[in-house]
Image (cartoon, helix red, strand yellow):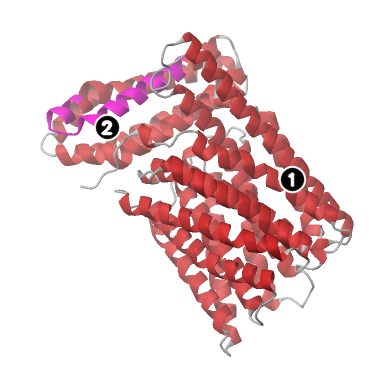
């Protein structure tokens, strides 16, 4: 019988995930500054360098950083298999990812090919290192569950998404963008968002949705079938994008299939959360529900798109719903649960101690609720931004305030950790094993 | 006849229910109710730990089950007991803030612990203790 060794020491040192989480909010601030630096409305044209730069601050600087940091914690705890050489891997991936995530948007915003030429090799190294380390960890994992499958597929999608991303950055840098750049960009976005981001959230939700709110588990058939079905639908879409057969109806069917599966996931999660046994108010739950509602709206909009009259910016709206509405909401919610727990866990581990602050003393709850309202307002502004310049400014302001608030919350958590650790070391000999 | 995994999973759910009711009452500042609900929760948890520590774990180890995971489970029980004691202090002082913070912490510790037991330890126990399962479950019901 295969079992996962029950060893809490498999969790990496707290510095491994926290360094990623601590830096991520700075990229929200950078995204805001990039958007504010543009005198036009960057949302009015998806190809504007400022929007491209701000989008990568959010997707690469904020989201990928949070996800890569979270994976270093998730793999040992959920899959029972730590990343190989966890400290070294974390340092290597962190340095290359952060420098690449700073240089790429800078290259777009400033129109500097040199910066892009520095950015893409760094990002290639970061993702290659991360994917190889994660796959090794998965290969060594004794667990065989639906979360492992979803994470594996998410990593495969990331690997596939990096290729067109690098080709595009190289093309931009050298001025050799091929006429197929639009298709490559579409494939890059589809694989990154529909694969890497979505499948990781799906796999992690299987574990954390029942755990945080005492909901029933996702039905077994759904956990077994959903991630592979999403991955297959995504691959079909990407192949159709790249090879563009004459039958346009095939693309419509493939897209509808993918978005219907997204809708199923959102509905299943909302239904389970509606049946939760824990009824107290919880900011993480509200972030999660906002995320699922946004995913459902994105799915409905995407399925209706072929039937709707041609209206400008509907695809931008779809991207905003998915990125800010779904992915960013879920990530904020997860951060507000994971970071206080990690701080508590690392202070408390190795024995029973007194004087360790509880989770709500590590990041006070009112900040989380303020952040939720700020995030809702930012999302609302962003949904109006393609048509209304002032809303674009409000969106940028929202990112700025969210970045500041999240950075403050995370640095407060780190300072509670340091202070308590110092006190424990003074009062109790050898408190941390 | 239920398996050890089925029987203990149902008991986890029973404890979860008690946890949720006590937390709700405490956060509503309904302290009379909270005290009753919390005491139920504490008793349910204590009984669950006794079933494991005085019956399941010793039988599993005697039946050549792995000692390492059992040791980790015992350590986590001690952690949870420490948090439950903190919650008891919060109930005494009518401190909803403190109760909410510790309950939030306990919930994650408890759910991670339950997951490990349900996915690994109990199936292991069912595997190693097939022959004695019925009598063991009988003894656990008596705790």
Q: Compared to B133, does B100 lie above or below?
A: above
Q: Position of residue A420 (x, y in %)?
A: 55, 18
Q: Chain of mark 1?
A: A
Q: Report the side of B58 relative to A75 (left or right).
A: left
* Residue tagged 2: B69
Q: Position of residue A5 (x, y in %)?
A: 29, 39
Q: Position of residue A260 (x, y in %)?
A: 55, 67
Q: Which residues are magenta?
A: B58-85
The image quarter in which residue A186 lies: bottom right
Kindly tell me whether residue B80 is visible in this rendering.
yes
Tell me the residue at 28%/36% (across/down).
B7
The residue beneath circle 1 is A29
For the C terminus of chain A, which image quadrant?
top left
Please determine whether, in this image, residue A309 is positioned above or below residue A266.
Answer: below
Residue at 26% x, 44% y: name it: A3
Q: Nearer the viewer, residue A163 or B111?
A: A163
Kindly report which numbered mark, 1 or 2, lies closer to the viewer in this rendering: 1
């Amino acid at each position: 019988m295969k079992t996962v060794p029950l060893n809490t020491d498999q969790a990496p040192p707290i510095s491994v995930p926290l360094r990623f989480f601590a830096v991520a909010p700075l990229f929200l601030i950078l995204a805001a500054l990039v958007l504010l630096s543009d005198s036009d409305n960057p949302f009015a044209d998806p190809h504007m360098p400022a929007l491209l730069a701000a989008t990568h601050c959010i997707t690469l600087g904020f989201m990928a950083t949070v996800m890569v940091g979270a994976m270093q914690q998730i793999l040992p705890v959920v899959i029972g298999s730590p990343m190989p050489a966890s400290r070294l891997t974390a340092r290597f991936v962190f340095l290359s990812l952060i420098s690449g995530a700073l240089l790429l948007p800078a290259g777009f915003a400033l129109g500097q090919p040199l910066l892009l030429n520095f950015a893409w090799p760094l990002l290639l190294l970061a993702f290659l290192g991360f994917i190889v380390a994660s796959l090794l960890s998965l290969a060594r994992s004794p667990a065989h569950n639906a979360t492992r499958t979803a994470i594996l597929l998410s990593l495969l999608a990331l690997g596939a998404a990096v290729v067109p991303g690098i080709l595009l950055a190289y093309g931009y840098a050298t001025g050799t963008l091929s006429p197929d750049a639009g298709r490559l960009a579409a494939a890059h976005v589809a694989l990154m968002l529909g694969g890497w981001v979505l499948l990781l959230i799906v796999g992690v939700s299987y574990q954390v949705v029942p755990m945080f709110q005492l909901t029933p588990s996702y039905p077994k058939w759904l956990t077994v079938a959903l991630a592979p079905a999403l991955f297959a639908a995504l691959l079909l879409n990407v192949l159709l994008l790249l090879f563009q057969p004459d039958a346009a109806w095939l693309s419509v069917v493939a897209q509808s299939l993918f978005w219907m599966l997204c809708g199923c996931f959102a509905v299943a999660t909302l239904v389970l959360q509606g049946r939760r046994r824990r009824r107290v108010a919880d900011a993480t739950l509200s972030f999660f529900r906002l995320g699922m509602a946004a995913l459902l709206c994105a799915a409905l909009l995407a399925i209706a798109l072929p039937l709707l009259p041609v209206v400008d910016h509907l695809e931008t709206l779809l991207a905003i719903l998915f990125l800010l509405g779904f992915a960013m909401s879920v990530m904020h919610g997860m951060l507000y649960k994971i970071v206080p727990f990690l701080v508590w866990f690392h202070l408390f581990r190795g024995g029973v101690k007194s004087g360790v602050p509880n989770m709500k003393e590590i990041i006070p709850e009112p900040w989380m609720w303020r952040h939720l309202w700020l995030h809702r307002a930012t999302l609302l502004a962003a949904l109006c931004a393609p048509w209304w310049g002032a809303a674009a400014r409000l969106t940028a302001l929202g990112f700025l305030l969210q970045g500041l608030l999240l950075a403050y919350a995370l640095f407060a958590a780190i300072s509670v950790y340091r202070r308590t650790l110092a006190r424990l070391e003074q009062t109790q000999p050898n408190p941390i094993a | 006849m239920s398996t050890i995994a089925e029987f203990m999973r149902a008991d986890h759910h029973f404890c979860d229910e008690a946890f949720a009711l006590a937390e709700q009452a405490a956060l509503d500042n309904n302290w009379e109710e909270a005290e009753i609900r919390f005491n139920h929760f504490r008793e349910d948890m204590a009984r669950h730990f006794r079933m494991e520590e005085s019956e399941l774990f010793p039988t599993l180890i005697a039946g050549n089950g792995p000692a390492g995971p059992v040791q980790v489970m015992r350590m986590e029980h001690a952690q949870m007991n420490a948090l439950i004691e903190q919650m008891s202090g919060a109930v005494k002082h009518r401190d909803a803030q403190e109760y909410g913070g510790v309950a939030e912490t306990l919930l994650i510790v408890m759910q991670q612990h339950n997951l490990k037991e349900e996915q690994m330890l109990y199936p292991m126990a069912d595997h190693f203790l097939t022959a004695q399962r019925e009598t063991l479950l009988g003894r656990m019901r008596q705790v």
